[in-house]
Amino acid sequence: MDDVWSEKAWDDFKQFFPNNGNGSRVVVTTQLSNVAVSVGSQDPYLMGFLDEENCWNLLCEKAFAQRGCPYPELEQIGKDIAKGCRGLPLALVVIGGLLAKSNMTREYWESVVKNVNSFANSEDNEYCLKVLSLTYNSLPIHLKPCFLYMRVFPEDKMIKVAKIIRLWVAEGFIKPARDKTLEEVAEAHLKDLIDMNLIFIRGWKTSGKIKSIGIHDLLRDLCLRESDRENFIRFPRVQRISAVEEDRNKCNLCHNQAFSSDGSINVSEIHVGLQSTSLATALVCEDCKSMYPDLMRLRWVKVFGRPSGKFLQHTRLRYISIGNRYLDINYEKDIISSSILSVLWNLQTLYIKSDIVTPIIALPFDLWMMPQLRHINITRVVLPNPVDAQDTTTILENLQKLSEIHNFRCTEEIVERIPNLKELQVGYPDDGDEWSYFHLHNLVHLHKLESLSLNATNFSLKSITFPTSLKKLVLGRHDDYWVVA
């Protein structure tokens, strides 16, 4: 019984197969993990993507009705076509059928290998997408925006689970649930999409949790089609015009190579603090042009070269992520200055990452008055003392992660302000001998802490008390690390 979509469907059907004790069996296939577990009398057999050898064998079976290719001049091209199907049997069957009807010329096969997805959907009025859309249509309403959001990532992108969860939360796709954080709800949504085979796992953490995910090209095409039909994303979420010299031939949206200036378009650039706008030229690749049909009407809200502090003064901003290319000492200070953070009432994620050695920067006291904060990841910063803040009552109940904090002092006042912290990464100076000054015995009161990373030259474990909730501990000394998971 192929492609069962619900437990009820099997319950209605199985009454016609009474157990007469004669040893017969009914084989049921389904895309839904929960259905597979509920209908089977034994553990379900999980079908993954096909490897290259089985992809090639299946393609040959459909194209030539035999194992192997009878046309030596087409064999290598055929293997490239099979590889382009990325292990999806549905795509292999459809394209194999097309090749079987072709005149077996090298030119035609080369046209197929250049765009496997288009050919997979060209037969029988987009047959593959019609089949895959059945899974999408069966999704509960709360999972649909999470799946459609996958369109913003380029093809073959390895997507970090932590990043997609932060983005889902920041976009408002995740609704609160009793006794669960938004991140925990998002993790459950991610697992549901994996169980329905709409996204797949690409990497694991040492703790056994999923580290990275991906989406098959055909399913990404489904994202594009359905999100266009529902007007889900009409404009790109990342809007930047780069003035960096080495980026002159890169798409300003996906950062992939655009190859020529023919992809330039004129868009409006908003001048922060002014009413006027002016035309700016941005280089955009063909994929992004087709992904965002309203791109020509877009008005950019970033400044050339790098986002300025003035732009970041936006009360609705939820997510700031700035990488190496825009960082220098003065700029990093400007971004996390009091004048900017004081108006970012809705900020959830502050990510400023630098691989270069930067001076230590103290975060302003305004940090303790930002209750929406969930993730802070900044290279070499010092937390301010909450006792000195103007507001001594605000609790950062949503804060999940503090990363790369310099000389972290785990005082009672700080512990009280971050009761639900799950991940902490801190570093101490080479000459740090007075461990009592850092109050690391208070770590035991961080009852939700699961991951702790301590980096120092000389540890005094006698001064540290670990919480029982801890699942991963990393102790580092320069280039040496000890990991307990």
Image (tube, rainbow, N blue to C red):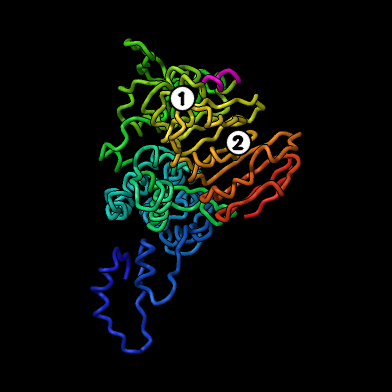
Which three-letter amino acid code belongs to the residue tagged 1? Leu
Q: Is residue 126 visible?
A: yes
* Secondary structure, magenta segment, majority class: helix
Is residue 350 positioned above or below 31 on the image? Answer: above
Q: Is residue 454 left or right of residue 311?
A: right
Q: Name the spot of residue 108 as percent of width and height, x first.
A: 42, 44
Which three-letter amino acid code belongs to the residue tagged 2? Glu
Q: Is residue 364 magenta?
A: no
**Bounds of the magenta segment:** 329-334
Q: Is residue 96 visible?
A: no
Give the quarter of the figure containing the C terminus: bottom right
Q: Residue at x 34, y 51 (%)?
A: 177
How packed mark 2 is, by other alpha carbons closer than 10 Å (few <14, some 14-19, many 20 or more), is: many
Q: Read off the residue under disc 1.
A: 341
Q: Name the spot of residue 116 as percent of width and height, x first.
A: 42, 46
Q: Residue at x 41, y 16 (%)?
A: 281
For marks 1 and 2, the one nearer the N-term is 1
Is residue 216 positioned above or below 430 on the image? Answer: below
Q: Read off the residue under disc 2.
A: 404
Q: Name the spot of residue 245 as percent of width and height, x first.
A: 56, 18
